[in-house]
Image (spheres, rainbow, N blue to C red):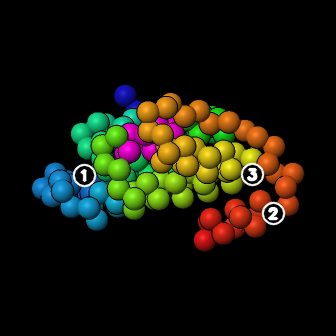
Amino acid sequence: MAKEVLKPAEQIFKNKLEAIEKARHFNPSDQKLLEIYLDTLPNVLPSEEVVKIILGMIGKEQSSVFLWENYLKNVCSTCNCTAESGLKEHEKAINQIRKINDSDVQMIQLFKMSALFLRQAGLEQFFALIHLMMSININAEVDVIFYAANECQNPHLMEFEELVLQ
């Protein structure tokens, strides 16, 4: 069997990942090591594998906004992520965190991440997210479905978008 030949940069990241995994074995609750680990994974593994690893971590710690943020970042960076699929993933994360721990700070973090994603996808979906968040706060029993309206025809909405994202 032929040995896999890696480029120098790939080998450095692979060695770094191995060292981080060893360190995490001895310090599994160290947040800084987890951050470095999750930042290094995409440099060594394909996006689909990174997503699977993060999903495994989320399965063990579903209330971790940090893990959900990394999951969303990696899912939305894949080449097959569409605005619709990315939106569904953001909705899944928001609903999961809301069920477990309805912390305002955590919800605002996920909301801002979703808003930035939607801003890149299109203005009308950004306002659909605002509608979703208001609906969640008003009536938690109703399943909320994202919708796309044609709000971008109103010139004042761009100003509101900038205010919300600040």
Q: Does 47 appear in magenta?
A: no
Amino acid at pointer 1? Glu
Q: Position of residue 122 (x, y in %)?
A: 74, 48
Q: Mark 3 points at which residue?
A: 123
- Which residue appears at 26% of the width and 61% of the height? 31
| Image: 99 above or below 103 | above
Q: Quadrant of the C terminus?
A: bottom right
Q: What residue type is labelled 2?
A: His
Label 3, secondary structure: give it.
Answer: helix
Residues 79 and 130: in front is 130
User: In the rendered image, which residue does mark 2 sit on?
Assistant: 156
* SS majority, magenta: helix
**Lower position in the chain sequence, tag 1 or tag 2:** 1
**Magenta residues, as a range?**
89-98
Q: Does the magenta stretch include residue 95?
A: yes
Above/below status of 18 relative to 163 = above
Callout 2: 10 Å neighbours few (<14), some, many (20+)?
few
Mark 3 closeness class: few <14, some 14–19, many ≥20 residues within 10 Å: many
